[in-house]
């Protein structure tokens, strides 16, 4: 190792000597060579010190669902076909009751409140379930489903989900189930989950079988929500006025109603909405959304069951 270092230094000294401008006599003196070597060595040392003392570049993970202002005065457009999704889009199909089929640009699929009666035509990658009623869960999900996310915990431990599948991130916020639902005649804490799907820059919250208005802790855990899938039956979940309160609490630009029983219960909810809410109707059970399609004011988009 020492011999190699000496040889390298000798070679470098020779190259340095050849690069030093010659004197008028055509010779390079030892003093000239040494002075050039010292100058170059000092320059290299200074450069090395600057590199070592420079601050490291922080590796900041981008926010998964970035906050933005994307108001649009135009009505919310509906997708009239099932063409491949573009980057920044997400497609929702209302299967029925409380189940939506969610598709991402990378082809990830999810079904909310998956049950034996509301299964999609294809096996999804992810399903979420709640157990206030049998129409919101199943004990026998298709074995081909990669992720089965139950909204209830076991042994008094709340369910906790934080799952990323390609371009979709799913997490949950637990709420309580009142007596007479689920598995008990008394209050059951943390036995319902509001699931949040973050995809294509949109935060979509499915409220599940919500039985009470939200606390500041719930709202903080939800974060900014862009699209709410809300039960509007007015009885089995929340009464109409309390559900409207929840929608104002969340303050999402777009609301898609679910969990209603015929046009009468849906119309009762719509009638009680204040003038602060706009109401639109989509012609098909399929709608493609993006950041650009978010409305300026809170809008209820009625999507027919598939």
Image: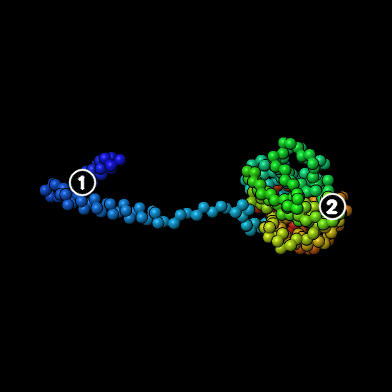
Residue 61 spot, x, y in % from top left: 56, 52
SS at mark 2? loop
Side (left or right) of 298 relative to 12: right
Identify the residue at horizontal 82%, vertical 62% (top origin). 241
Categorize mark 1 by other alpha carbons within 10 Å: few (<14), some (14-19), many (20+).
some
Q: Quadrant of the N terminus?
A: top left
Label number found at residue 86: none
Q: Work out whether residue 86 can be spotted.
A: no
Q: Quadrant of the C terminus?
A: top right
Q: Nearer the viewer, mark 2 or mark 1?
A: 2
SS at mark 1? helix
Q: Is residue 65 above or below residue 142?
A: below
Seen from the viewer's position, the closer of residues 33 and 279 is 33
Residue 66 spot, x, y in % from top left: 61, 55
Categorize mark 2 by other alpha carbons within 10 Å: few (<14), some (14-19), many (20+).
few
Identify the residue at horizontal 16%, vertical 49% (top origin). 30
The residue to which callout 2 is attached is 184
Identify the residue at horizontal 25%, vertical 54% (top origin). 39
The residue to which callout 1 is attached is 17
Snapshot quadrant of residue 277: bottom right
* Residue furthest right as drawn: 264
Residue 185 spot, x, y in % from top left: 86, 54
* CA distance separating discs 2 and 1: 92 Å
Marks 2 and 1, the one that precedes in the sequence: 1
Residue 225 spot, x, y in % from top left: 69, 56
Side (left or right) of 36 relative to 165: left
């Amino acid at each position: 190792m020492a011999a190699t270092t000496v040889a390298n230094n000798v070679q470098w000294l020779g190259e340095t000597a050849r690069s030093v401008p010659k004197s008028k006599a055509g010779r390079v003196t030892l003093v000239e060579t040494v002075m050039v070597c010292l100058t170059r060595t000092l320059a290299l040392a200074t450069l090395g010190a600057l590199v070592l003392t420079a601050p490291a570049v922080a590796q900041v993970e981008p926010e998964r669902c970035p906050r933005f202002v994307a108001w649009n005065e135009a009505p919310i457009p509906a997708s009239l076909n099932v063409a491949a999704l573009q980057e920044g889009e997400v497609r929702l199909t209302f299967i029925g009751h409380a189940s939506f089929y969610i598709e991402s640009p990378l082809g990830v699929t999810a079904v909310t409140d998956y049950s034996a009666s509301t299964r999609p035509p294809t096996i999804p990658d992810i399903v979420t379930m709640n157990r206030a009623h049998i129409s919101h869960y199943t004990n026998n999900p298709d074995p081909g489903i990669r992720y089965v996310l139950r909204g209830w915990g076991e042994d008094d431990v709340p369910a906790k989900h934080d799952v990323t599948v390609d371009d979709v991130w799913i997490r949950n916020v637990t709420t309580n189930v009142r007596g007479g639902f689920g598995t008990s005649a008394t209050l059951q804490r943390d036995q319902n989950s509001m699931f949040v799907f973050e995809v294509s820059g949109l935060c979509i919250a499915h409220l599940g079988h919500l039985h009470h208005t939200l606390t500041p802790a719930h709202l903080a855990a939800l974060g900014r929500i862009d699209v709410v899938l809300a039960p509007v039956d007015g009885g089995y979940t929340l009464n109409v006025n309390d559900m409207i309160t929840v929608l104002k609490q969340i303050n999402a630009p777009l609301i898609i109603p679910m969990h209603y029983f015929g046009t009468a219960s849906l119309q009762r909810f719509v009638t009680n909405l204040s003038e602060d809410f706009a109401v639109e109707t989509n012609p098909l059970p399929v709608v493609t959304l993006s950041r650009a399609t978010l409305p300026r004011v809170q809008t209820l988009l009625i999507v027919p069951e598939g």
